[in-house]
Image: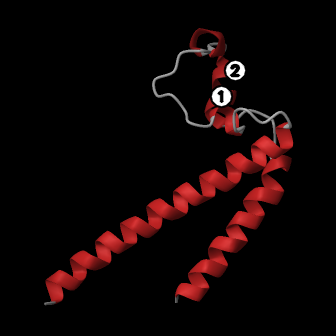
């Protein structure tokens, strides 16, 4: 099982690292709606929560493609880690119920 999990993680990291620089630069759905309805200027620069990697570009890296690839890899690792940790917590709870 762990070998399959590591293979899936490796594949996800390769996809994130190689394909994320080619992601569309067009706005996402919510940003597009704000542009279409004309209120994007009123919310630009107002952050409710500070993003660790704003605009999917890792800060401090001069090459935008590389910065995007690094952001994709780190984001993939973060999501994988969170999902793995949550799975461990849930399975530990189920094991306690069965004992």
Q: 92 or 46, which lies in front?
A: 92
Residue 88 % position (x, y): 35, 73
Kindly identify the residue that appears in the image at 64 percent across and 76 percent down: 8
In the picture as drawn, the residue positioned furthest to the front comes out as 60
| Quadrant position of residue 56 | top right
Instruction: Determine whether, in the image, residue 56 is placed left or right of residue 96.
Output: right
The kind of secondary structure element at disc 2 is: helix
Kindly identify the residue that appears in the image at 69 percent across and 51 percent down: 72
Name the disc covering residue 18, or none.
none
Which residue is tagged 2? 35
Query: How busy is the neighbourhood of tag 1: few (under 14 within 10 Å), some, or many (20 plus)?
Result: few
Residue 17 % position (x, y): 77, 57
Q: Are marks 2 and 1 in contact (CB under 8 Å)?
A: yes
The answer to whether 44 is drawn above or below residue 5 in the figure is: above
Instruction: Determine whether, in the image, residue 76 is placed left or right of residue 81.
Output: right
Instruction: Determine whether, in the image, residue 33 is placed left or right of residue 48.
Output: right
Q: 31 or 44, which lies in front?
A: 44
Which residue is tagged 1? 31
Residue 36 % position (x, y): 70, 21
| Quadrant position of residue 73 | bottom right
Query: How busy is the neighbourhood of tag 2: few (under 14 within 10 Å), some, or many (20 plus)?
Result: few
The answer to whether 9 is drawn above or below residue 20 in the figure is: below
The kind of secondary structure element at disc 1 is: helix
Residue 33 % position (x, y): 65, 27
* Quadrant into which the C terminus falls: bottom left
The answer to whether 42 is drawn above or below residue 64 in the figure is: above
Q: 42 or 86, which lies in front?
A: 86
Q: CA distance from mark 2 to mark 1?
A: 6 Å
In the picture as drawn, the residue positioned furthest to the top comes out as 42
The answer to whether 40 is drawn above or below residue 90 in the figure is: above
Kindly identify the residue that appears in the image at 37 percent across and 66 percent down: 86
């Amino acid at each position: 099982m762990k070998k399959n999990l590591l293979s899936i993680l490796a594949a996800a990291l390769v996809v994130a690292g190689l394909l994320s620089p080619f992601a569309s630069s067009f706005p996402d759905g919510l940003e597009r709606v704000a542009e279409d309805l004309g209120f994007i200027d009123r919310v630009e620069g107002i952050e409710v929560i500070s993003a660790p990697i704003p605009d999917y570009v890792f800060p401090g890296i001069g090459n935008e493609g590389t910065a995007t690839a690094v952001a994709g890899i780190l984001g993939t690792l973060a999501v994988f880690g969170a999902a793995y940790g949550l799975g461990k917590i849930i399975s530990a709870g189920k094991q306690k119920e069965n004992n």
